[in-house]
Structure formats: structure tokens, C-alpha cells
Amino acid sequence: MLAINLGFMERTVVLIKPDGVKRNLVGEVVSRFEKVGLKIVAMKMMWAKGDHLGKHYTDDKEYLISLGKKTLKTYEDYGRDAGKDLGTKDPLELGRMIRGWTIDYVGSGPIVAILLEGRHAVDNVKSIAGPTMPVNAPAGTIRGDFSTDSAAYANPEKRGVENIVHVSGSNEEAAFEEKLWFHESDIHSY
């Protein structure tokens, strides 16, 4: 049985990435979260640096291998050759490439970091954002409405997938990201 603590509201992190900021989608993105009752408890605009993004996008070996395996699966699904396009089929090496491209992409312009609070905040934010790959995101989600990018295009172009937002994937990830992106003095209770 799932235990629910009714006195606790979840918190989760959203980063509006440079493509979302440059396309003037900040208000639209924020509006979608506010309309479902999620509360902004911290928000700031910043230009994230490589070392900070390196903490966010971990260089953990298992994580990198999982990125590489996803890349190989994408290439397989589209009938393409990762070795030919990227020079390797090694999942760890591919994961390192993807991580580097993602850090370069998110560090390419200003971002808006938001800490949201509310009931089932992590799950609700993930649902509103849609799947990570915009090509798989249904209409009505942020990624489905504002991007058509995919790894099938981004990888051969050696760049990160432009998907408008990052959202925390779990409560554990949200807690880590909250501490990474916000100081206690940034967070407001009301």
C-alpha cells in the first residue's frame, strides 16, 4: 500500500533550456504548470556554466552507458549506422559524446530555472512536459507542441536534442537538482 503524507508537497525542478528562452516560450511554459495548480517557489534566469552543468548531467559510467545504448537503439530504429555517423558503436563512448553535446546545448544561452511545488509535482510536471524526445511527445505537451527534434537528427549533427525543457525524472532527482540549482535563500514559502 502506498503511504501518502498529506502534510508534504513535492518539489521538482524545471529548466527552460536556451531554445525555449530564445523562442520566447518562458511565459507559455510557466503558465502550463501554474494552470494545474503547481506553485513557483523559486525562479531565476541564468547562463549555466560547463562545470555546473557537468554536475547536473553526471559522468557516472552507468548513466553514460545507458545514454549510449539509447543512441544505438535510435540508430537501429531509423536504419542508420552509428559507427559511420559517429565513429564508434561503444555505448560508453557514445554516452560521453551525448553528454558533451547536451552540456554544450544547455550552456549555449540563458536558461530559466524553476522550482515548483505541489501535489505529485514530479509526475505532473513530467506529464505536462511530455517524453524527452519531442518526436514522441503528444500534442498538448510542451515538447509535443513546441519541438519536432529527435536524436535521429541531433546525433549526426553532433548536438543536443532541442526539447525546450528539462524536468526532474524522480523525487530523488528533484531533491538533488533543487540543491544544485537553488540556495535556501532563493526558495519562498507562501
Image (spheres, grey):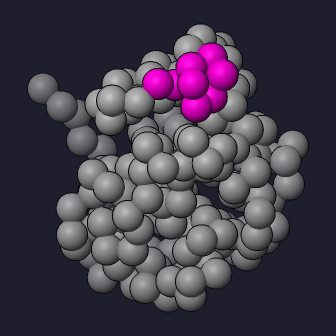
Left or right for 118, reference 14: left
Left or right for 70, reference 76: right
The answer to whether residue 134 is seen in the rendering is: yes
The quadrant in which residue 42 appears is: bottom right
- Figure check: 93 above or below 137: above
- Figure check: 55 above or below 131: above
**Whole-percent x, y for residue 60 in the image:** 67, 19
Q: Which residue is the extreme one toward the left? A: 1
The quadrant in which residue 138 appears is: bottom left
Q: Considering depth in this image, is 34 or 21 the residue closer to the camera?
A: 21
- Figure check: 38 above or below 102: below
Residue range (magenta): 81-88
Residue at image position (66%, 69%) is 18
**Whole-percent x, y for residue 185 in the image:** 77, 66
Instruction: Reply yes or no: does residue 8 show up in magenta.
Output: no
Q: Considering depth in this image, is 32 or 49 the residue closer to the camera?
A: 49
Q: Considering depth in this image, is 85 or 56 the residue closer to the camera?
A: 85
Residue at image position (21%, 69%) is 139
Left or right for 12, reference 51: left
**Whole-percent x, y for residue 33 in the image:** 37, 74
Instruction: Reply yes or no: does residue 84 show up in magenta.
Output: yes
The answer to whether residue 118 is seen in the rendering is: no
Residue at image position (69%, 56%) is 105
Total numbered labels: 0
Q: Quadrant of the N terminus?
A: top left
**Whole-percent x, y for residue 24 in the image:** 56, 88
Q: Main secondary structure of the magenta part?
A: helix
Residue at image position (53%, 60%) is 162
